[in-house]
Amino acid sequence: MAAKWGMKPEVLEMVAARFKLLSEPLRLRILQEVGKSEMTVSEIAETLQATQRNVSKHLKMLQEGGALSRRQEKNVVYYSLSDPSSIDICDVVCFSIRKRLSQQSNLLTQRRRKK
């Protein structure tokens, strides 16, 4: 996949902001869970074994960043994935990491065989 260079600085700022949004492991875990189904704050906190306060803080950031949607039914707030590109970005990075680790493993195996 080739990079689409020549983007305006304003666009690159937006790209950097998206990567910053995805730079926190707990936010990635939240996206992973909410990507499966709509969830409440307490369900997310329980599933991830995190405090409700911490989860709420990250949910707010993900919502403000456009990755999550929020809807309220009476006293209960539900979160769902609003931008699947966040998951797509994670998939691309995970594929790249798996590929690199596989290559490193193959190199180590080859070096051991030469000894």
Image: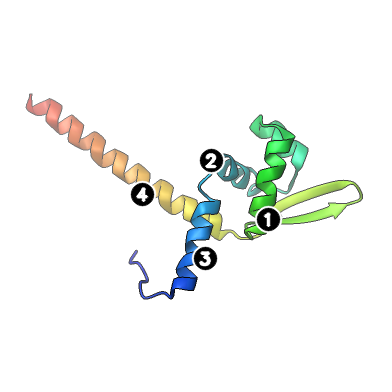
Q: In the picture provided, is 63 more to the left or to the right than 72?
A: left
The answer to which of marks 3 and 4 sits earlier in the sequence is 3
Q: In the picture provided, is 88 more to the left or to the right than 51?
A: left
Mark 3–mark 2 distance (CA, rounded to whole Å): 20 Å
Q: Name the residue under label 3.
A: 14
Identity of the amino acid at label 4? Ser
Question: Picture coordinates of residue 67 (x, y %)?
Answer: 62, 57
Q: Name the residue under label 1.
A: 63
Which residue corresponds to the image point at 13% horizontal and 30% vertical from the top-left? 111
Identity of the amino acid at label 2? Pro
Mark 1–mark 3 distance (CA, rounded to whole Å): 15 Å
The answer to which of marks 4 and 1 sits earlier in the sequence is 1
Which residue corresponds to the image point at 68% horizontal and 47% vertical from the top-left? 59
For discs 1 and 3, the disc positioned in front in the rendered view: 3
Which residue corresponds to the image point at 36% horizontal and 42% vertical from the top-left? 98
Mark 1 surroundings within 10 Å by alpha-carbon count, few (fewer than 14), some (14 through 19), many (20 or more): some
At mark 2, the secondary structure is helix
Q: Mark 4 points at which residue?
A: 96
For discs 2 and 4, the disc positioned in front in the rendered view: 2
The answer to which of marks 2 and 4 sits earlier in the sequence is 2
For discs 3 and 2, the disc positioned in front in the rendered view: 3
The answer to which of marks 3 and 2 sits earlier in the sequence is 3
Q: Can you say whether 110 is above or below 18 in the image?
A: above
For discs 4 and 1, the disc positioned in front in the rendered view: 1
Identity of the amino acid at label 3? Met
Mark 3 surroundings within 10 Å by alpha-carbon count, few (fewer than 14), some (14 through 19), many (20 or more): few
For discs 3 and 4, the disc positioned in front in the rendered view: 3
Instruction: Please report contact status of discs 1 and 3: CB closer than 8 Å, yes or no.
Output: no
Mark 4–mark 1 distance (CA, rounded to whole Å): 27 Å
Question: Picture coordinates of residue 91 (x, y %)?
Answer: 46, 51
At mark 4, the secondary structure is helix
Mark 1–mark 2 distance (CA, rounded to whole Å): 16 Å
